[in-house]
Image (tube, coloured by chain):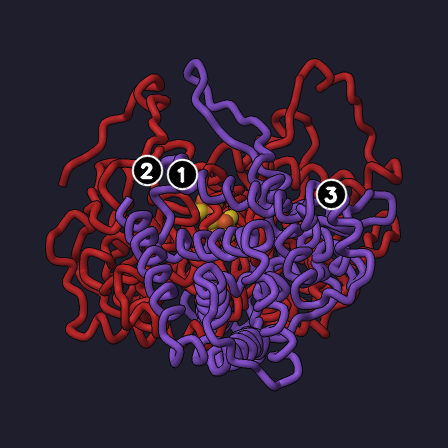
Chain colours: A red, B purple
């Protein structure tokens, strides 16, 4: 297996945007070292009951696909074309105006034309035309259609895992065509024949079993949070409480497991602990719902639902009134746009009201989950926090385009 | 490149065929009597079919693309057009999108300058795209609804010679040329352009130029068009003895475009209204969105979790449901 060497900055910035002479359909996909992830392990696939668990790597010639892989993919495509208007419409109405082309960071950073959102979509669209449109069936290549072959599947794998589902392309498209949506469909199809990456499947498998991506078991979570509390006590002399799995708490707090596990997430987490202590919030962490993030978003909508279900289930078991969520981009896409639809209605919870300020979070009245930034903004607005802006006013800061909270939620 | 050449050849062949038709009485009458209705029928039925198919396919999730602050606490200023929380915001957003191509207005481009990516504004596509679509609309309306008073008068204020040279024609040609040229000149655009992308532009270009040719250089053809149109409208098409060459090409292009329309990307005209990333309010946490096929999935329950970790939980002093 070839491994990548870390490129130097001037090598990285030597990007050429000129596409090659050869038409893209004839350009073979080269799995350049350092640009792809290792395959999902048989163990993680089995843990999630995903199809075709086996030992393989994208660099192998033989991907050990199931006998009838083509049929599986085409059936899967048909099913999704019927289930999602977005997919069908986005396959049909792109005019190839190119407005989205240079909006993708993968294209900006690589110059690889197949990373232009429009072309990433064409990788799938060409197959759609060949099998699902009359023109494509009849005129083939002239109609922009091509056969589904193993090489095409490999190309999908290479390029559909080079998309962060950030929706930036969608903001610029005159029809709102969202490549993230097409990427999701592409990955669902790849998953049907067992072509997944371990960076996604292992965290998903961990999350399913232990409640969080990192596979931290209940004792581990308690240890880590206690350790943070010790650190805080050392530094500030104040001992903060660490409520875990506490029944009857008013609020369930859910944050990505990266926050317990590694810097700089731990600093954020210590911030949460101190904030909640300072305002005297009656809340609890959960070890079962110990993950806000959701790697199902990078697998399939079904997996999103399976992993997300724990949050409402745990809120119900612990008998809390509402849920507060820590910071995480794709987590909030799931919370905002999918959770209520998939696992709601959360009619056993109450409309969120801040116990400190009495503010009613009407914008979360159905989902019953409030973002930590909303919650804290309300505290500041109502003068509940003693802040000293002069401690930070030496910094020049800028807004970081935070993909999913910005474009799949509207939190700026 | 191949796609460009193929499209040019295709359009050339169409011109030759059209010229041939003009020399045959039978084919001419076919072109003026049967095909007009057939093409229109295909267009209407096809358009309706495609739109209804999209409209009735489920929208499982509310996936609004948000480009501004959502409605949140009352003192946080929200952006009703980029993150609409109700139907009025959605209508405003869609209207700006459809009438003014608002997203394209945002367009930027990127270049590596001195080892840094630099982003600049790029409004040309927006400008010419808008010019093209609006002038096309006006020209089409002028043809099919000449009774809209004032349209021609306002539009024709460039009274260059007789017959009037319409402003919209000039705008349409300019817009079209820009859209076509960028597909030929900009390498990335050429790389992604399909045969059909060129054909669509060439067909419209052909229709406009033959139309202009007739109006300004071939009054005989123009008269024929008027008679024909009157005949079609009253369902009593008159078969002309011989149709003019330019007219024949013009008609062939028009009917081809009409009949092809529902099967082509030109359907973006209908699709733009149905895009779930744009036509839904961003009120996800306020109102539950229902997925018609929300299928049950296998989850890992708390009981299963506790069964696996009970001892460890007890050891860590965490509460458990079952001792
Ligand atoms: S901006 Fe939209 S219509 Fe234009 S090429 Fe991209 S996806 Fe297609
Ligand atoms: S969603 Fe983001 S990463 Fe994916 S194609 Fe669009 S811009 Fe690129």
Determine whether, in the image, residue B294 is placed left or right of residue A240: left
Disc 1 to disc 2: CB gap under 8 Å: yes
Residue A15, compared with residue A195, is above or below; it is above
Q: Mark 2 points at which residue?
A: A112
Look at the numbered disc 2 and give the secondary structure of its residue: loop
Q: In which quarter of the image is the N terminus of chain A?
A: top left
Determine whether, in the image, residue A92 is placed left or right of residue A359: left
Q: Which mark is residue A87?
A: none
User: Quick one: label 1, few (<14), some, or many (20+) residues within 10 Å?
Assistant: some
The response on whether ligand 2 sits within 8 Å of label 1 is yes
Using the rendered view, name the quadrant where residue B180 is placed: top left
Tell me the mark number nearer the camera, choosing from 1 and 2.
2
Q: Residue A106 carries which label?
A: 1
Disc 3 to disc 2: CB gap under 8 Å: no
Look at the numbered disc 1 and give the secondary structure of its residue: helix
Residue A75, compared with residue A375, is above or below; it is below
Tell me the CA gap for discs 3 and 2. 50 Å
Task: Between residue B247 and residue A22, name the one nearer to us.
Answer: B247
Name the subunit of mark 1. A
Tell me the CA gap for discs 1 and 2. 8 Å
Residue A251, compared with residue A344, is above or below; it is above
Residue under disc 3 on the same chain as residue under disc 1: no
Residue B80, compared with residue A186, is above or below; it is above
Q: Which mark is residue B159?
A: 3
Name the subunit of mark 2. A
């Amino acid at each position: 297996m070839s491994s990548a060497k870390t490129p130097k900055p001037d090598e990285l910035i030597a990007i050429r945007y000129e596409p090659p002479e050869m038409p893209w359909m004839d350009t073979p996909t080269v799995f350049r070292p350092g640009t792809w992830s290792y395959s999902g392990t048989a163990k993680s696939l089995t843990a999630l009951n995903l199809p075709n668990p086996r030992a393989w790597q994208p660099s192998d010639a033989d991907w050990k696909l199931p006998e009838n892989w083509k049929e599986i993919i085409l059936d899967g495509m048909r099913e999704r074309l019927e289930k999602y208007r977005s997919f069908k419409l986005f396959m049909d109405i792109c005019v190839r105006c190119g407005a989205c082309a240079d909006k993708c960071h993968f294209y900006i950073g690589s110059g690889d034309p197949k990373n232009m959102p429009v072309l990433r979509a064409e990788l799938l669209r060409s197959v759609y035309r060949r099998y699902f449109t009359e023109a494509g069936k009849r005129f083939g290549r002239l109609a922009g259609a091509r056969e589904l072959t193993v090489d095409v599947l490999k190309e999908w794998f290479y390029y559909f895992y080079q998309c962060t589902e950030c929706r930036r392309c969608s903001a610029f498209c005159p029809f709102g065509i969202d490549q993230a949506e097409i990427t999701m469909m592409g990955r669902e199809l790849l998953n049907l024949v067992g072509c997944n990456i371990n960076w996604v499947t292992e965290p998903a498998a961990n999350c399913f079993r232990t409640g969080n991506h990192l596979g931290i078991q209940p004792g581990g979570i308690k240890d880590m949070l206690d350790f943070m509390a010790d650190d805080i006590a050392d530094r500030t002399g104040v001992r903060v409480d660490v409520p875990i799995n506490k029944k009857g708490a008013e609020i369930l707090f859910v944050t990505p497991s990266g926050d317990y596990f590694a810097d700089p997430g731990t600093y954020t987490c210590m911030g949460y602990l101190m904030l909640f202590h300072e305002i005297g919030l009656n809340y609890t962490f959960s070890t079962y719902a110990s993950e806000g993030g959701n790697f199902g978003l990078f697998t399939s909508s079904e997996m999103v639902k399976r992993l997300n279900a724990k949050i409402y289930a745990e809120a119900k078991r612990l008998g809390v009134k509402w849920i507060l969520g820590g910071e995480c981009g794709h987590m909030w896409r799931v919370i905002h746009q999918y959770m209520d639809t998939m696992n709601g209605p959360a009619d056993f919870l109450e409309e969120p009201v801040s116990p400190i300020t009495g503010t009613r979070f009407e914008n979360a009245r159905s989902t019953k989950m409030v973002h930590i930034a909303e919650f804290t903004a309300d505290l500041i607005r109502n003068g509940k926090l003693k802040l000293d802006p002069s401690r930070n006013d030496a910094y020049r800061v800028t807004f970081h385009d935070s993909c999913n909270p910005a474009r799949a939620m509207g939190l700026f | 490149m191949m796609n460009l050449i193929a499209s040019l050849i295709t359009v050339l062949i169409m011109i030759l065929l059209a010229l041939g038709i003009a020399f045959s009485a039978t084919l001419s009458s076919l072109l003026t009597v049967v095909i007009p209705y057939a093409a229109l029928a295909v267009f209407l039925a096809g358009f309706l079919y495609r739109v209804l198919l999209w409209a009735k396919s489920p929208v499982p999730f509310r996936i609004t693309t948000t480009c501004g602050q959502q409605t949140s606490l009352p003192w946080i200023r929200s952006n009703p057009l980029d993150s609409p929380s109700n139907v009025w915001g959605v209508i405003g957003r869609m209207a700006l999108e459809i009438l003014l191509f608002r997203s394209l207005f945002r367009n930027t481009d990127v270049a590596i300058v001195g080892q840094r990516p630099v982003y600049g504004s790029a409004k040309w596509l927006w400008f010419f795209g808008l010019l093209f679509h609006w002038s096309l609309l006006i020209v089409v309306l002028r043809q099919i609804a000449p009774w809209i008073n004032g349209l021609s008068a306002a539009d024709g204020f460039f009274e260059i010679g007789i017959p009037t040279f319409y402003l919209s024609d000039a705008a349409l040609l300019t817009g079209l040329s820009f859209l076509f040229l960028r597909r030929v000149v900009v390498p990335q655009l050429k790389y992604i352009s399909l045969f059909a992308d060129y054909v669509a532009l060439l067909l419209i270009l052909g229709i406009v130029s033959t139309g202009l040719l007739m109006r300004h250089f071939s009054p005989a053809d123009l008269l024929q068009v008027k008679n024909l149109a009157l005949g079609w409208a009253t369902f009593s098409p008159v078969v002309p003895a011989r149709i003019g060459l330019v007219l024949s090409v013009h008609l062939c292009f028009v009917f081809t475009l009409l009949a092809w329309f529902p099967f082509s990307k030109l359907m973006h005209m209908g699709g733009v209204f149905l895009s779930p990333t744009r036509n839904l309010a961003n009120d996800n946490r306020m109102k539950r969105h229902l997925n018609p096929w929300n299928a049950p999935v296998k989850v890992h329950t708390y009981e299963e979790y506790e069964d696996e970790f009970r001892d460890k939980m007890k050891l860590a002093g965490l509460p458990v449901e079952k001792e």
